[in-house]
Amino acid sequence: MPDASAENRIASLEAELAELRAEMQEFTATVSHDLRAPLRHIVSYVQLVEEDAGPLLTAEVREFLATITHASRQMGKQLDGLTLLSRAGSAALVVARSTASTLRPASWKSTRLNSSH
């Protein structure tokens, strides 16, 4: 049985960890929010250019605009992932029994191991 000082130290570390997780979540939420507004502006300006100058744009310029839009949307997805990652640390863990076959990806199911190796 752990002594009282060890239990106090564990409780202190758990409280510190909870505080750090909360700070990380707040930081990532702020960063995500602050970066989304410029991304929305970029995509909106690209749409305005396409609408206003569409017929005048060369194929190369249309490709540039498509790349800008795609990259902006990709960055939005990355911000979503960052937000999810920051929340993962505070999510409750669920302990469940599992087998190796349920853990492997579905694409592995068709893979056969070579028994000669």
Image: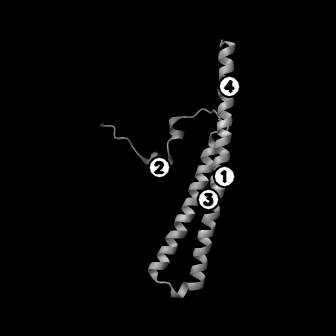
Regarding residue 10, the answer to whether it shows in the image is yes
Give the mark, 4 or 1, whose residue is nearer the N terminus: 4
Please identify the quadrant where the N terminus is shown.
Answer: top right
For the residue carrying disc 3, how many other residues have a C-alpha within 10 Å: few (<14), some (14-19), or many (20+)? some
Give the mark, 4 or 3, whose residue is nearer the N terminus: 4
Q: Residue furthest left?
A: 116
Q: CA distance from mark 2 to mark 1?
A: 37 Å
Q: Secondary structure at mark 1?
A: helix
Percent x, y for residue 59?
Answer: 45, 81
Q: Secondary structure at mark 2?
A: helix
Label 1 near label 3: C-beta < 8 Å? no
Pointer 2 residue: 107
Percent x, y for residue 34?
Answer: 64, 58
Pointer 1 residue: 30
Give the mark, 3 or 1, whose residue is nearer the N terminus: 1
Residue under the image location 62 percent in, 45 percent down = 86
Please identify the quadrant where the C terminus is shown.
Answer: top left
The kind of residue on which mark 2 rests is: Ser
